[in-house]
Amino acid sequence: MKPGVGLALSGHPSHVELLRPLAELVDFLEICPEQLWNSPIELSSRVELYEQLKAETGKRFVAHGLGLSLGTPLSTPEEELRTERWLSQIARLHERLELEWYTDHLGSSHTAGGLVTGLHLPLPHTDEAVQAVKERLERLQRIVPLVGFENTVFYFTLEDPMQEASFYNRLCRETGARLLLDLHNVYAHCRNFGLDPLAFVGKIDLANVLELHLSGGSESDPSWLEGPVLRLDSHDGPVPEPVWELLDEVLPRCPAVRGVTLERIEGTIEPEELPLLRRELERIRLAVAQKALK
């Protein structure tokens, strides 16, 4: 199957309206579910904007979540309740927008004690971590049958950073889920840990890839860590050339990929930048077309 071209949208109506003219260039639109509910038990009226967009454009919708906290064990009544509320909201959203697949970030953003960490924290490569991810993905799969996890940019790891790639393979093998391979996240991970991106992706079983993400990012302020500069997963700029080079290398080797999605966070795009985003989407379309010819 030829992969589609996707565009990520955030929940704010002004951002959606700004990017609406680009919908004609893509095959599907990707939403962030948590931006479409007011609380863990109430959907926002913003859902209506997406329903209207779906009706007007005929585009398919997929979802990329932030808060399911795939690596947190369901070990307390409080975490069970939070997770079931989260899944109930996903079910309501799926009923409204007919999501083709659902992915979330690999890592843990909630502790077993109920604390929210903000950023996703890395997981140990243990049986317990695999089981935690598996249990959440299985529950999610009861709602949206096609599910996956995204490789996350971590700024420290609990294991050898090169072995993150092998951990993705194990998770796919033992959970039956697919991988959303974010190529900017690969670039940032390898920059931050001094790794070769091609060697890193060479360890990934690319047959597991469901979707590819492309985005830009930025460098951390040197004063934060008194010297070291980290590559941030900030989605606030154009796709850098090394990430395009990764796309050219990786896309032809992903036999079951369903889509390639461009991400740009709300609040970082001015109207005069729409031609740049249009060119980026056209470049993705060209890469997809070239894959189809091979």
Image: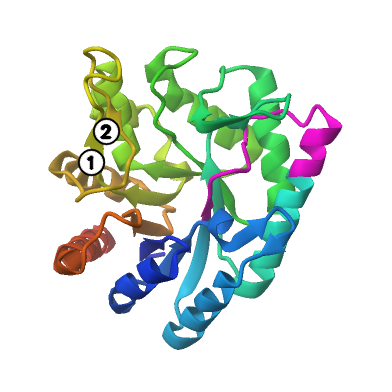
Task: Relative to 255, say whether 183 is above or below.
Answer: above
Q: Quadrant of residue 109?
A: top right
Disc 2 or disc 1, which is closer to the eye? 2
Q: Which mark is residue 187?
A: 2
Q: CA distance from mark 2 to mark 1?
A: 8 Å
Residue at the image point whose x is 44% and y is 23% from the top: 164
User: Measured from the top left, where is residue 107 in percent x and y?
Assistant: 55, 30
Q: Residue 162 or 237: which is nearer the viewer? A: 237
Placement of the C terminus among the 4 image quadrants = bottom left
Q: Amino acid at mark 2?
A: Tyr
SS at circle 2: helix
Q: As drawn, is 76 to the left or to the right of 112?
A: right
Pick the residue in front: 254 or 281.
Answer: 281
Give the left or right position of residue 225, taking residue 241 as reference. Answer: right
Quadrant location of the N terminus in the rendered image: bottom left
Label of residue 69 in the image: none
The answer to whether 78 is drawn above or below residue 67 in the figure is above
Say which residue label 1 marks.
Answer: 246
Horizontal and vertical percent position of residue 94? 65, 66
Q: Which tag, 2 or 1, sits closer to the chain's start? A: 2
How is the structure coloured here? rainbow
Can the viewer see residue 171?
yes
Residue 67: within the magenta? yes
Tell me which segment is drawn in magenta. Answer: 64-82
Of the pair 249 and 129, the residue shown nearer to us: 129
Mark yes or no: residue 3 visible: no
Give, as a three-letter code, the residue at label 1. Leu
**Left or right: where 9 falls relative to 169:** left
Q: Residue at x 44, y 64 (%)?
A: 12
